[in-house]
Image (spheres, helix red, strand yellow):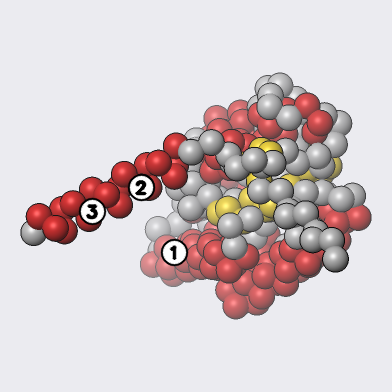
Amino acid sequence: MFGRTVTAFTGVAVLAAVWAAPPAAGAEPWRPVVMAALGDSISAGFNACGWYVACASRSWSAGDNPAVQSHYLRMLDVNEDLFGHNVSLAVAGATSADLAGQVAGAVERNADYVTVLIGAQDACVAEERRMTPVSVYERRVAEALKLFRTARPAGRVFVASIPDVKRLWRVGKDNVAARGFWSLGRICPTMLARPTSTAPADQARRDRVRARVAGYNAALARVCAAYGPACKFDGNALFNCPFTLDHVSKWDFFHPNDAGQRLIAQRTFPVIRAWLEEPVPMPEPAVQP
């Protein structure tokens, strides 16, 4: 017993010493020079500051509006080299099928940090049968991130979970204006059609759509884990976020307004904050013959 106790204590002491040790000589903190926002209308800031237009300046990811306090602005606090190098490649209506093309654009711009938030439009389609299968979604995302890792091996990726669209239904179903916009704009009909219906068929449909989104998020976790330590998934922080109607645009009651974009940034940035404090080992010098 005592021998084991001493061994365990010694192990803890060694680990503490390692954690407390200063960065190795030549190591420098991670400081990306170009960042890119990849994804759909959420990252594009759609409806965040104008009538049915993208508003990249208020994106939770690469936006430069102080009202949002995006990843970009938070990283600028410790990394002035990033100034002006925030690129938005997210497109309203994009699905997982479009991610590889966006990654190619990020590679062309030499991005060394990308954020990915995509998948709501894979589930928000006209009919349930048209939702992207989880296996297809996972393959598309994996292939897109493989392109980035191959072209930008020193780059890093943050992957956000897809928000819970059933929560949107729950917080908006009793709001007359929300129901009107959902119906008029045919917004996410797989989840938001017949919002006041309590029929078993409609309740089951909503549960299936939510399960599909949860399946996408599980796929994102797997893909990011397979990518390695240069990828971080938010652990469903965004999916579990308790947003309200105060966080969505009053022009469609679907997309985040500036308060919603700020909330996304607040919920997701802690996942990558440690990267800004983590030293990146410098490559060993080549041995001369």
Tell me the crowding category of disc 3: few under 14, some 14 to 19, or many 20 or more residues within 10 angstroms, Cα based.
few
Dot 3 or dot 1, earlier in sequence: 3
Q: Which amino acid does label 3 sit on?
A: Ala
The numbered disc on residue 196 is none
Q: Residue at x 31, y 44 (%)?
A: 13
x then y, percent, for residue 33: 81, 39
Q: How far apart are marks 3 and 1 (CA)?
A: 47 Å
Quarter in which the C terminus is drawn: bottom right
The numbered disc on residue 8 is 3
> Is residue 168 shown left or right of residue 103?
left
Dot 2 or dot 1, earlier in sequence: 2
Q: What residue type is labelled 1?
A: Asp
Q: Mark 2 points at which residue?
A: 14
Q: Name the residue under label 1.
A: 207
> Is residue 40 shown left or right of residue 151?
left
x then y, percent, for residue 231: 62, 56
